[in-house]
Structures are given as structure tokens and as C-alpha cells.
């Protein structure tokens, strides 16, 4: 009982539950025409902030990439940047770190280069953030990392530090490899994979193999507990991810239509 009361207390007094509560209280005391707007806002925010809704919004973006099928041969692995924070012992943020490590594992197993893509923030790109992260982990990695400025025929880390978004990732990666239609293994977060593949195809790359990480939804979950229906910032973040990808895909399709 104390555990449940603690969960309710936290859900109501921390965002986004706090905002839902405030909007609901304002709706209660407001005039009729304002009340409907505030009540609608409170309901909408509440729904986006609970796991049953957020999970079902995000699951369709992740589900197709649950299982990874790798080719026997490929020209390169490309890991899409996910952000970094200079000054941390491991500068790559969670999503970016998992992408980079998974991409390196694939590149090492197939003995092909890994293109680390993304220009980062304020002059500190994803490639150098990865190198600094690997230096911090050197005592447990105990392995020398081969680095090359241009693509080679074996495992090495290759910097691509000019791209500002996924489309530029695709265009610059294709230019670096110097092939009309290279075979690429794309590593990014599961929810972002569908749009990433669309953008790579838009850039003219057709032979693509998705290798997704950072899954946030458990597809085997069939029931929810009481606390799952309480507003949660984690659920709201998953709703944001789903909506961000949805509108991103709309933009890609519009770009294809205009092209």
C-alpha cells in the first residue's frame, strides 16, 4: 500500500503528471468554453504520458527491426550519431554509445570499416567523442583500435564529421565509399531505423541492412499494472519519439513527392 501511494504521489507531483493535475484543476474552475480546452489538453497530455498509449505509439516503429540479419559481405557499417557531451568520462550519450559499440562489433566480426557519422555539437564530433570514450574504457577493452581517414578493406574506424542530419549521413557516406551503390549495414536506434533507411534510399543507396539498437518497448508485454496508467516522463518521452518519427517520415515522403 505504501509503495502504491508513493508511486501516486510521485506521478502527480512531478512532470508530466504535475501539468496534467494543474490543467485539470484549472479546467474545474474555469468558464465553460475555457474548461473544454483545458480538459482536452489535460486528457491529451495524460494519454501521451502513460505506458499503454506510449508503447502502442512507438512499437510499430521498432517491431520490424527486432531481429538483425547481416550479410556475408558488405562495404561498410555506418553508425548514425546520437549526441555527445564533452567533459564526461564517456562523452557519447547512451543512445550514441550503444550505436557505436554495436557498429564496432559488427564491423569487427565481418572485418569491414565502420563509418562513424555525425558532426556533433560545438565542434566536438561523434568520432572524437567515440575515441575519447574508448580511451576511458581501454583498461577493459585491451585492444588497439585501428583508425583511418578513408575507407579501407578491413576493420577500422572512419570519421565522417560533416553531416548534420541523417540525410547528409547517407549522402556523405556514399561519397566517401566512392561506389555507385554500396552495400551498407546501418546502425541506429530501432525507432529511428525506418526513417533512416528511407533517407539512405533517397540518397541513392539501395543495398541496406538494418542493425537496430536501443529498443524501448517489450513486445511480449501483454498486460499493465496500475502504475503504468500513472503519468510518467519515460512514457511521454516514448510518445515524443513516436511522434517525432511519424512527422519525420511525412517530411521524407513529401521530399520524395516534390523530387
Image: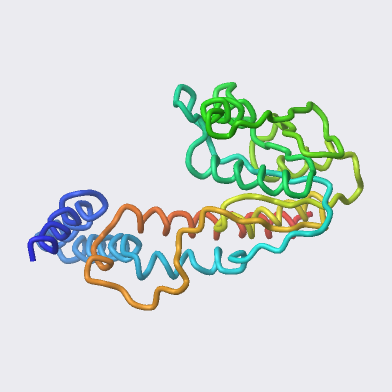
State the quadrant of the C terminus.
bottom right
Q: Is residue 121 above or below residue 7?
A: above
Q: Where does the N terminus fall, quadrant-wise? A: bottom left
Residues 176 and 26: in front is 176
| Percent coordinates x, y for residue 215 in the rendering | 50, 58
Residue at image position (45%, 64%) is 217
Between 106 and 128, the one nearer to me in the picture? 106
Q: How many marks?
A: 0
Residue at 66% over, 46% down: 105
Residue occupying image coordinates x 69% and y 35%? 163
Residue 238 vs 101, above or below: the answer is below
- Give the x, y percent position of residue 220: 45, 74
In the visual, does 28 lie left or right of 150? left
Q: Quarter of the image holding residue 160?
A: top right
Colour mapping = rainbow
Q: Which residue shows up at 52% across the image and 34% down it?
A: 92
In the image, residue 23 sits, relative to residue 91, either above or below, namely below
Instruction: Give the side of residue 32 with respect to residue 112, left or right.
Output: left
Q: Position of residue 235 (x, y in %)?
A: 35, 58
Camera-side residue: 31 or 238? Answer: 238
Give residue 24's quadrant in the image.
bottom left
Q: Seen in the image, is 114 located left or right of residue 183? A: left
Q: Which x, y percent locates residue 131?
A: 61, 27
Amino acid at each position: 500500500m505504501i509503495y502504491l501511494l508513493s508511486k501516486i504521489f510521485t506521478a502527480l507531483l512531478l512532470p508530466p503528471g504535475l501539468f496534467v493535475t494543474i490543467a485539470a484543476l484549472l479546467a474545474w474552475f474555469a468558464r465553460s468554453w475555457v474548461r473544454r480546452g483545458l480538459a482536452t489538453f489535460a486528457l491529451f497530455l495524460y494519454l501521451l504520458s502513460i505506458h499503454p498509449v506510449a508503447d502502442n505509439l512507438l512499437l510499430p516503429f521498432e517491431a520490424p527491426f527486432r531481429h538483425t540479419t547481416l550479410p556475408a559481405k558488405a562495404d561498410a557499417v555506418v553508425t548514425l550519431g546520437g549526441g555527445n557531451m564533452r567533459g564526461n568520462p564517456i562523452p557519447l550519450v547512451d543512445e550514441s554509445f550503444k550505436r557505436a559499440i554495436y557498429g564496432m562489433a559488427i564491423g569487427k566480426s565481418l572485418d569491414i570499416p565502420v563509418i562513424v557519422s555525425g558532426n556533433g555539437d560545438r565542434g566536438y564530433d561523434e568520432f572524437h567523442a567515440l575515441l575519447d570514450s574508448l580511451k576511458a574504457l581501454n583498461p577493459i577493452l585491451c585492444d588497439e583500435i585501428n583508425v583511418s581517414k578513408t575507407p579501407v578493406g578491413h576493420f577500422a574506424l572512419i570519421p565522417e564529421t560533416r553531416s548534420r542530419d541523417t540525410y547528409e549521413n547517407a549522402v556523405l557516406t556514399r561519397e566517401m565509399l566512392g561506389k555507385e551503390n554500396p552495400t551498407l549495414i546501418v546502425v541506429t536506434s530501432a525507432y529511428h531505423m525506418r526513417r533512416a533507411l528511407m533517407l539512405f534510399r533517397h540518397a541513392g543507396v539501395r543495398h541496406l541492412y538494418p542493425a537496430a539498437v536501443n529498443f524501448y518497448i517489450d513486445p511480449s508485454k501483454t498486460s499493465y499494472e496500475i502504475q503504468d496508467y500513472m503519468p510518467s516522463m519515460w512514457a511521454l518521452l516514448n510518445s515524443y519519439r513516436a511522434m517525432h518519427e511519424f512527422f519525420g517520415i511525412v517530411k521524407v515522403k513529401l521530399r520524395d513527392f516534390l523530387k
